[in-house]
Image (spheres, rainbow, N blue to C red):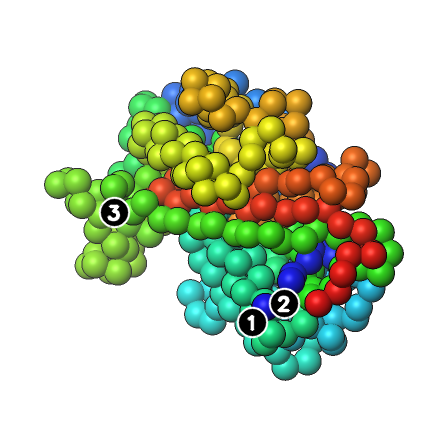
Amino acid sequence: MATAYITASGQFLPGDPVPNERMADHIGLLPEAAERVGRTTLRQNRIRTRHYAMGADGRTDWTVAGMVAEAIRDTLSQAEIEGQAVGYLATATTQNDLMVPGLASQVHAALGLPPMEVASLQSVCASSMMALKSAWLQLRAGEHRAALVGGGEFASRYFRPGFYQGTATLTEGKPLPADAAFLRWTLSDGAAAVLLETRPAARGLSLRIDWLSLRSFADRFDPCMTAGAVDDGSGRLLPWSHHANIGAAAQAGAFQLRQDVAALHRMLPVWLSEFMRLVDEGKIDPQAVDWFCCHYSAHSLREEMIRLATRAGCMIPEERWFSNLSSKGNVGAASIFLILDDLIRGGSLREGHKVLLAVPESGQCIMAYAGLTVVGPEEKRE
């Protein structure tokens, strides 16, 4: 089977970085009681700046498809091949702009590239790794020689006050429920992408994809991060389409993003056990990892991960961790590609370096890892 290499990467972040004190200019203010969880959340996630595609006036010219297309254009500007040489496009997002058609079709149209095979992957953060694996397997199988993978999010459009006011979620004089408030102060917007080829770049460094593992543990957990449904009072999720009409679904809060933070913490040991499984299989050697690119939504979760990994004796030294959470925020399906692009552009990679990608997803518990090796142009071409 052919070997696949990441030969270029790129990103697109809308607007200027938004500091914590200016967040309300973009996502709006709710009553004071509803914002208390926000201040606690910011202390926990330690995000200092992020980007929003939603302007201070509540308007936008952006879509997820448009941002992913911009990230891909940035990627192709770093590449040695033209977009016309790419035969496969895979996209990832939590929520598409449209219900139909898929995001990949919209991105393809925005790019104006010739006819190509596409795949639209939808989940939460791990959808990026689903898209990456689909492209990796396509190249390994010999179906294509080059593939583009892009992830993007436009979470801020769901955080404007109008999505809460007049709904059962926001009761006058009471705070916003924690499951609705947490994500409002955690998620932001943007896109990033990578180019995969069956040969390394002729100049500079490439990242050989050695292996990629993704596993769902939905058999053990109820949904943790949800949108499009509300609890029917018995602990079951009632989809928006099962309400009497669209208005009733909206009033019940079915179109709001929610996160069960307690359930999120219960997933941490499962994510670590998946890491240990890969150590036992010989895919991961914690001491041999030069760069650990781990996506996490809050610094407090990182601290808990470090505590569990240290206790289990499989801790990757913290000085080898690479993150941009504090400056670029949690951009869901785009995050791991944003981290990787920043690492590549930072100039710290050297031939032979081992890079480990880690993407936990709280949607209904998914854990994805990928092992990469930095190679030069002289790497044997398949």
Mark 1 vs mark 3, CA separation in Å: 30 Å
Which quarter of the picture shows residue 203?
bottom right
Q: Residue at x 83, y 56 (%)?
A: 378
Residue 296 in view: yes
Out of 360 and 42, give the one closest to the viewer. Answer: 360
Q: Earlier in the sequence, mark 2 or mark 1?
A: 2
Residue 47 in view: no
In the rendered image, the residue lying farthest to the right is: 203
Q: Give me the disc on residue 267.
A: none
Q: Earlier in the sequence, mark 2 or mark 3?
A: 2
Amino acid on which the number 1 mark rests in the picture: Ala
Question: Do residues under tags 2 and 1 come within 8 Å of each other at their CB atoms?
Answer: yes
Out of 133 and 55, give the one closest to the viewer. Answer: 133
Out of 39 and 137, give the one closest to the viewer. Answer: 137
Q: Is residue 93 left or right of residue 109?
A: left
Task: Please determine whether, in this image, residue 201 is positioned above or below residue 216.
Answer: below
Q: For the residue carrying disc 1, how many other residues have a C-alpha within 10 Å: few (<14), some (14-19), or many (20+)? A: few
User: To which residue does mark 1 refer?
Assistant: 141
Q: Position of residue 189 (x, y in %)?
A: 59, 45
